[in-house]
Image (cartoon, grey):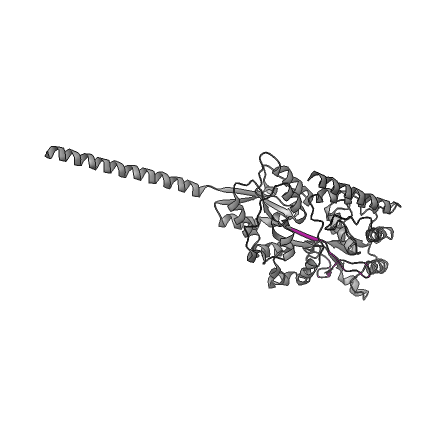
Amino acid sequence: MKLRLKQSLQRLSFLRIFGLILILLISMKLLFACTNQSKEVVKLSFVVTQREAQYWQPLIHQFNSNNPNIQVELKNDAGNNPQNPNSSTEVRNTYISDLESKSPSYDLIYMDIIWVPEFAQKNLLMDLTQEFSKDELNEFISSEVEYGKYKNKLYRIPFRSDVGVLYYRKDLLDELNQKPPETFEDLMQISREVKEQKGIPYGYLWQGKPSEAMTAMFVEVLYSSGGFWIDENKNIGLDKPEAIKAVEFLRDTIKQGISPENLTTYAYDEQYTRSLFRDSKAVFMRNWPNVWLEVNGSELSFPGKIGIKSVVHAEGKESRACKGSWGFGIAKNTKYKKQALAAIRFFTNAASQQKFTLAYGSMPSRRDLFYEPKIVAKYRYYPELLKMVENSVARPPIPEYAEASRILQEYLNEALNPDNKDYKQIMEEAASQTEKLLIKSNRQL
């Protein structure tokens, strides 16, 4: 009896020890799995225009340092697959090609304001409506948030805003006791006077090369003439009297020698016109706020002598600058939604926007930053820029935007040739082709 009891106790002890060992092994396995999981590094990437690539690196480095399990990479600088797009159109094409492929590589989508309807309709973007609270969104300029929506769903969180402005040589106007121009005629008259008395080659530089910059420029002249391009009811205004007046103003700047005769050719890209203005070859230039650092830096012969104001308008009308904006969306099929949201929240927060604004000269998308002392100390005109943003006009928020812009660029470039007498008929054809595009797209829905 004692022997059997002893054997039973031994078996019980063995089972207990075996059980404890088994539990220990399972616990170690789970711990090992958790440890490996915590060490897994999620890689996210996006691409920007090459002009702003270098300004992104400090923010990316800061985010990666703070989040060792999430590493963001800017594809522009990837040595094994350099993208290096030079324009917003090239950035768009890069994303479209990638997201529509069988194996998309981008999780973060750095988006121009005009892409939201197209990308959303193609089902390339994640719906962010439930990911950001009303209080979070209220920190941004309201229009920045609204134009990140399509069919009442939010697809893009704003990072930086933009608006077209008029640069002018304040020193030259002061010498002639002239105020900055308000109307088209003011600009023409002052340009003639400065050219004659100061020997400046050109009066007014604008974006005439077929590109999205040309479209944005014309939107400003068009709406500041009281016209419109495509309204909310899909009506076309490119052949209306106000549109013809806008075309005639631009044609006149070339015909009268106020603007270079070859301004509408591919030789006059944005960089070249900036260089002309920087080198004292023109009195006025239409461009974006981030050009300020390039044309008004300490290396110039006239530092501090550049002014910036709202774009000019037709007599009896108001200035309507073109709204620009960039922000972040998330690829629809991403495996890393949580990590992508963390990156977006970091890049679009106030501290990140302030750092980028001070370095790049672009405009923030958060209202309070337009009055932030450090920003205003460097860019004294930012409070005024906020007013321009709030009165700006957006390009048509339609899925067919890319093709509509291409049509406008093609026909407008032809119409702006001063030797072409049929510019009215050309704009009529531009309106007709745009209408056909919208009708065709509507049928395909």
Q: Quadrant of the C terminus?
A: top right
Number of marks present in the image shown:
0
Magenta stretch, main secondary structure, is: loop
- Whether residue 360 is visible here, answered yes or no, is no
Q: Position of residue 444 (x, y in %)?
A: 70, 38
Could you say which is closer to the camera, residue 171 or residue 342? 342
Specify the quadrant of the image occupied by residue 102: top right
- Outermost residue, left direction? 1
Specify the quadrant of the image occupied by residue 167: bottom right
Q: Quadrant of the N terminus?
A: top left
Q: Position of residue 180 (x, y in %)?
A: 78, 62
Q: Position of residue 360 (x, y in %)?
A: 64, 53
Magenta run includes residue 308: yes
Q: Position of residue 334 (x, y in %)?
A: 55, 41
In the image, is 261 to the left or to the right of 112?
Answer: right
In the image, is 280 to the left or to the right of 149?
Answer: right
- The residue that appears at 75% across and 46% down in the rendered structure is 269
- Whether residue 77 is visible here, answered yes or no, is yes
Could you say which is closer to the camera, residue 369 or residue 179? 369
Query: Magenta part of the protein: which range?
Result: 301-325
Magenta run includes residue 375: no
- The residue that appears at 33% across and 38% down in the rendered structure is 26
Could you say which is closer to the camera, residue 264 or residue 223? 223
